[in-house]
Image (cartoon, rainbow, N blue to C red):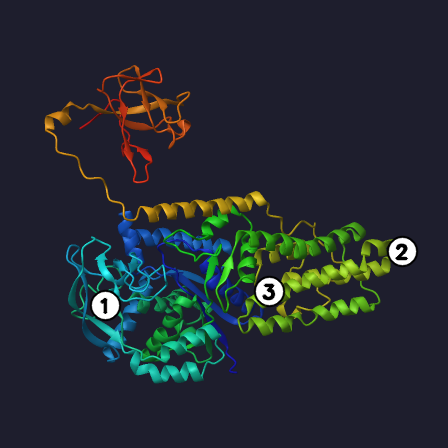
Amino acid sequence: MKHFKRTTVTAALPYANGGVHIGHLAGVYVPADIYVRYLRLKKEDVIFIGGSDEHGVPITIRAKKEGCTPQDICDRYHKIIKDSFKEFGISFDIYSRTTSPTHNKLASDFFRKLYDDGKLIEKETEQYYDPEAHQFLADRYIMGTCPHCGNERAYGDQCEKCGSDLSPMELINPHSTISGAKPEIRKTKNWYLPLNEYQDWLKQWILEGHKEWRPNVYGQCKSWLDMDLQPRAMTRDLDWGIPVPVKGAEGKVLYVWFDAPIGYISNTKELCDKEPEKWGSWEKWWKDEDTRLIHFIGKDNIVFHCLIFPVMLKAHGGYILPDNVPANEFLNLENDKISTSRNWAVWLDEYLRDFPGKQDVLRYVLTANAPETKDNNFTWKDFQERNNSELVGIYGNFVNRALQLTKKYWNGVVPAAGELLDVDKQAIAEFKDVKDKMEALLDVFKFRDAQKEAMNLARIGNKYITECEPWKVWKTDKKRCETILNISLQLVANLSIAFEPFLPFSSKDLREMIGLEKFEWSQLGSTDLLAPGHQLGEPHLLFEKIEDDVIQKQLDKLAATKVANEKAEELKDYKAEPVKENIPFDEWEKLDIRVGHIKDCQKVKKSNKLLQFTLDDGSGKDRTILSGIAKFYKPEDLVGKDVLFIANLAPRKMMGIESQGMILSALNADGSLALTTTFSKVLPGSQIG
């Protein structure tokens, strides 16, 4: 196996149209961070590249829904994602974006070189066109019935119900998601990367040259290569993205999957241009044969990183190719597929708010459940169990026992070891080769098993202390007790190193607790990390139990999401009631609709439906109105709000109370009522007209 001087590590660029969830973390970012931290510990030359993917249809769809620009969406979510990664400890050397000037130029120049070198094919094809929106439709802007499962809301690229990959032309009864119009088939011109011309090279490079790749990655590549690869469009008819730098390509942008992986290169260039004295030229990280390139991705990106991007690099020339692509499978949530569109996810920014200071707990659980070769499942009960029984009950328990006993018997000073008995030698023998075991696993991206080896140190420690019973030995043989605690403390110090790639926050906390200021990865497994006479810090619990009520809140949140999804599914075909017959304008003019300010609101006794409102209607006198919305609002939540009401209805008595008008509310499809109000603040009594 070739020895490389340096390693370029990339993590898939998340779309800047939403936050990052636990599926992303388990599939890409936690394993990438573990690997980079491991290489840094070994003092290897490594660069860790990340960034937001800010082009493509998902961003334009979100912008249209929210009535803002795509750049507004990118700016909002880029900050959320970047801040969340930083707080979670994903230690990128740079986290940039594909809307940066550096990226725009590099991606444009990359495409232009392929074009100038004759590596692209110009083709005219038929695509769907929205005659009302006056634009060609990207796959995600087309919806229809899936030909495989009958789902009436399948997109033009994939059915989210059955998971089938689709093309827009396969959909039954397609319509535009922009206007709802039936799309027309029109001709358009785009530029294609002829993957078929590189098929033999890809077979040799992957199937013969990279048999060490994970079975799921190798198998998916083989499946694609066993078919005849076809040319793939590298441009799109869109108005959001990097303009195609070719005459006659007005109104076209670079395909997001051409644009995005170049972001790894442009982000590296951006970093190296800012800090050349530290990083040197960006080209050594992408063009030097002594550099190893590793892509961390999810399984849905395998074809792009293993086939399309390598062909792009090969066609361009001068670039190194990926040495490994350790893609993970998918992580499910509570036995259901994670779905951003259904909000069925645990979002990182929300987790960080709900579980402050518990970044390492999630890192630990996601690594323990890592979907390295097959889909896996995250449940909140398992999260709680692993925290309470493993982090608290095994790791934290051993550390606390060793430190508290040392504090009790030696005032927190590391005692010297004396003559070793068989039980001591056995414990030392069990952990002395931990470095070799962990390296053998980390080097081939088996992070789940490597973390188990780290946790095994704590199991060895607990077993050793329990067998030796230093609290009893202290009474009869203080020298012997010193030896037991010395070995226990050496194990504690080893734990702070072994867990560093996995649990960086608690590892730092532990090293500060024991005063281990300097350490080397090469010291892992040694018994002289803490010298006799060394003063330890004040011990405290490394982890804390997570109680049932905390977990129940998360389960309740998911249950509410499921109810909302079921309701949305029920209402997906909802159509408003037909408009009533027209009335003369003068009849409308008879209604006196005004703005009222709610001064007080109370439930009407003996009524499940009625609320009694006290309104400031601008007249100087309070107005009482009853409204049947008690099922949908809490009275205390309405005080201080403005509502619209009809002021000139004849008074009417209900439950013995005179109601002087009618508050206007909208009837939802599900039968719920929503009060009407104004967009901006107006004075009580203002007329609506």
When asked about the image quadrant of residue 512, the answer is bottom right
Q: Amino acid at mark 1?
A: Val
Which is more N-terminal, label 3 or label 2? 3
Q: Which labelled disc corresponds to residue 476?
A: 2
Q: Nearer the viewer, residue 322 or 110?
A: 322
Residue 547 position (above or below residue 502): above
Q: Which labelled disc corresponds to residue 451?
A: 3
Q: Is residue 122 left or right of residue 372?
A: left
Q: Residues within 10 Å of mark 2 (few under 14, many from 20)?
A: few
Q: Residue at x 18, y 24 (%)?
A: 591
- Mark in the foreground, 1 or 3: 3
Which is more N-terminal, label 2 or label 1? 1
Of all residues, the one furthest to the right in this rendering is 476
Look at the image and tell me whether residue 54 can be seen.
yes
Q: Residues within 10 Å of mark 3 (few under 14, many from 20)?
A: many
Q: Position of residue 560 (x, y in %)?
A: 43, 44
Q: Is residue 589 left or right of residue 147?
A: left
Secondary structure beneath disc 1?
loop
Query: Are discs 1 and 3 less than 8 Å apart at CB?
Result: no
Q: Which labelled disc corresponds to residue 492?
A: none
Residue 244 position (above or below residue 15): below
Q: Position of residue 189 (x, y in %)?
A: 18, 70
Q: Amino acid at mark 2?
A: Thr
Q: Residues within 10 Å of mark 1 (few under 14, many from 20)?
A: many
Secondary structure beneath disc 3?
helix
Q: Is residue 492 left or right of residue 600?
A: right
Q: Position of residue 244 (x, y in %)?
A: 23, 68
> Label 1 belongs to which residue?
244
Q: Amino acid at mark 3?
A: Gln
